[in-house]
Image: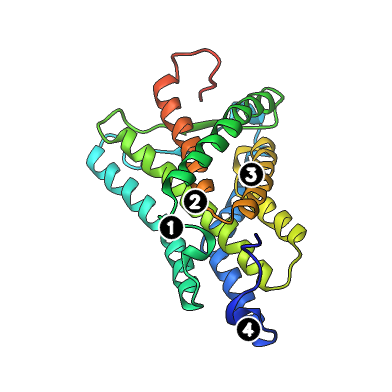
Amino acid sequence: MRPEAPSGPASGAGPDRRVLRSETLIVLALSLGASAVSALISFVGAATRPGGLKHQAATLNASHAPGRPWLDLAWQLFGIATALVPVLLVAHLLTREGAGLRSIGFDRTRPGTDLARGAAVAAAIGGSGLLFYLAVRAAGFNLTVVPENLPDVWWRIPVLIASAAQNAVLEEVVVVGYLLRRLGQLGWTPAAALVASAALRGSYHLYQGIGGLVGNAVMGVVFVLLYRRWGRVGPLVAAHALIDIVAFVGYALLAGRVGWLPTA
């Protein structure tokens, strides 16, 4: 199946392609393309700071109002909700062309299959990803990734789970489903579209270091190939969410209690 192949009115030439090109750039500028630029600036700062990368930390889920848990919760929920706005924009754009999110396989038609496939992918990638992170950090190519430093309050775990789900939906809908569809409509070859999607995924993880860039780019290749095989982002969203939930919640439960897990 070729879910990113041209379809609908966007398959034409001329102004349609110019509009699609501009639309794609705008969506990326409002979402993960902007994150890639931010990650690059962050990495340059870390790489030029005295001391090795592994002695610096990249915090993923930080407290926004230390000592004020209700205000902190409000900021956490606000951040999660606003991060999903690009997904709503993508849904609007796909619906306008008569396709909708169902065209990229983000719907509720196969929840059991999506979850089962996602769990299998998460199991395969999660363990190898952790070993890769530990290795590149020990070699000095990665910052110490701190998945969370939220206060120990009742909403800590639910917020971490919601944050993981938000990451999964945003990245898989935009970087796989939407981007591959648009690049296909713009005439990109499948190989070029795969490289673009994987490179983008790696680039907005560069704030973690070279390991974050390389590891996530490889994950991006795998996810694109699976998307082309299954024609759905649903399993990828499930896999990504499960990987992040284990990372976020696992760190919250194990940090400082096991010797092999690096902490800031």
> In the displayed structure, would residue 173 be above or below residue 235?
below
Residue holding disc 4? 16
Q: Residue at x 52, y 12 (%)?
A: 259
The answer to which of marks 3 and 4 sits earlier in the sequence is 4
Comparing labels 3 and 4, the label whose residue is closer to the camera: 4
Q: What residue sits right under mark 2 in the picture?
A: 234
| Mark 2 or mark 1: whose residue is earlier in sequence | 1
Q: Position of residue 69 (x, y in %)?
A: 25, 37
Q: Which residue is mark 1?
A: 107
Relative horizontal placement of residue 220, taking residue 158 as reference (left or right): right
Residue contact at pointers 4 and 1, CB within 8 angstroms:
no
The CA distance from mark 2 to mark 1 is 7 Å
Tell me whether the residue at label 2 lies in contact with that at label 1, contact meaning CB atoms closer than 8 angstroms: yes
CB contact under 8 Å: marks 2 and 4: no
Q: Is residue 31 left or right of residue 41?
A: left
Disc 4 crowd rating (10 Å Cα; few below 14, some 14-19, many 20+) is some
The three-letter amino acid code for the residue at tag 2 is Gly
Is disc 1 surrounded by few (<14), some (14 to 19) or many (20+) residues within 10 Å? some
Q: Is residue 51 visible?
A: no
What amino acid is at disc 3?
Answer: Leu
Residue 95, above or below 145 = below
Q: Which residue is mark 3?
A: 206
User: Where is the N terminus found, in terms of image quarters?
Assistant: bottom right
Upstream in sequence: badge 2 or badge 4: 4
User: Residues at badges 2 and 3 in contact (C-beta under 8 Å)?
Assistant: no
Element marked by disc 2: helix
Identify the residue at horizontal 56%, vertical 63% (top origin): 178
Front residue of 152/10: it is 10
